[in-house]
Amino acid sequence: MTLPALVRLGDLTGGRDNNFQLLRFLAAGAVLVFHCYALTDRWTDEPLWRVAHELDLGSLGVKAFFVISGFLVTQSWVTRRRLDQFVVARALRIYPALFVATLWTIALAALSSRVPFLGFIAHPQTGSYLLHTALGLDVRDSLPGAFAANPFPHSVNGSLWTLPIELRLYIAIAIGGVAGLVTRRAAWLCALAALSAVFVAKPGWLTALLPGGDVPHLAQLALCFGLGSLAYVWRDALPVSLVGAAACVALVAWNPAGLAREALFPPLLVYVVLVAAYDPRLRFRAFNRIGDYSYGLYVYAFPIQQTIVQRAPGIEPLLLLAYAFPAALAMAVLSWHAIEHPALGLKSRFD
């Protein structure tokens, strides 16, 4: 009896035949669903949290995004190995839709506020929000009088808090790439292990470098991104196994000693995400024929949800989902075809 050859991740990463577009969409959808519960003050009714208090759909979606981002951004550097091309590629992916989302948030927030429109636009807080949020490195989350009476008051686009973290992690990849570490897998492993040791010894340094959260949360996001990056660099050594991925899911469900949903969760999640992306038996090629609507769904949904909550006080989470998801998806579709995809087409001018 001949045993089947073990498939390595590196055997499957040569082209675009993968499920990343679908996985990003599902991750953005998970964040949207979580916010339907959070923004209606039904936190404890959120389905995943009810069965596993260490997890929720919002954090799961965000962590999956960071795994995918770490993997693909590292691939972007290894493919190009030029700082100018890397920076342009990242900027064209992030900033066009972010700028529009910033204006979109200001518009919906103005409609929600009792501050007169001209006063709202001229308010220093509005100018600060536009500048800082559109740049992405220091996003703000409040505007004059916006959503003041909502169950989750004053927050205008809470989803954007992850962008400053992600952009700083892009910078880390660029620094590691210029230093010649990212393309040498042992060196990159040692570098990330050393950084992890430093942050364990000096956790305050982590919050100084990655703003927007507490140390445990930031550490998990950074670890998801870093492990995603390492997975690409070590792709030729990583087996792709549905059985292994199922074992990871079972381990999280069992959660022995609480480890699988805490310290072990990032590596378990990385493996499940990458198997779901690349195992040939799971490929859903039809989804890749539509646009990549995940980023738009992520950056436009929150102010839509807050607006609906304001206009329909006491709305239930599932009804909010029924209203908000189609509206946010419509914005994401328009954004992809009118803004994001044309912007990404400009990358070829810098190759």
Image (tube, rainbow, N blue to C red):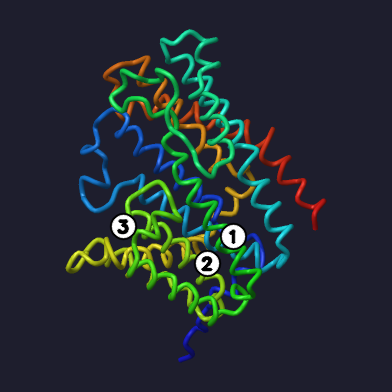
| Marks 3 and 1 close (CB-CB < 8 Å) | no
- Residue matched to label 1: 73
SS state under label 3: helix
Identity of the amino acid at label 3?
A: Pro
- Residue matched to label 2: 229
Identity of the amino acid at label 2?
A: Ser
| Marks 1 and 2 close (CB-CB < 8 Å) | yes
Spatial CA distance of label 3 from label 1 is: 23 Å
Residue 282 lies, with reference to residue 166, above or below; the image says below
Q: Residue at x 39, y 54 (%)?
A: 207
Pointer 2: residues within 10 angstroms few (<14), some, or many (20+)? many
Residue 3 lies, with reference to residue 241, above or below; the image says below
- Residue matched to label 3: 216
Q: Residue at x 32, y 25 (%)?
A: 153
In the image, taking residue 347 as reference, residue 295 lies left or right, namely: left
Comes first in the chain, label 1 or label 2: 1
Q: Residue 46, percent across and down?
A: 26, 40
Badge nearest the viewer, 2 or 3: 3
Comes first in the chain, label 2 or label 3: 3
Identity of the amino acid at label 1?
A: Val
Comes first in the chain, label 3 or label 1: 1
Front-most of residues 71 and 94: 94
Q: Residue furthest left?
A: 257
Spatial CA distance of label 1 from label 2 is: 8 Å
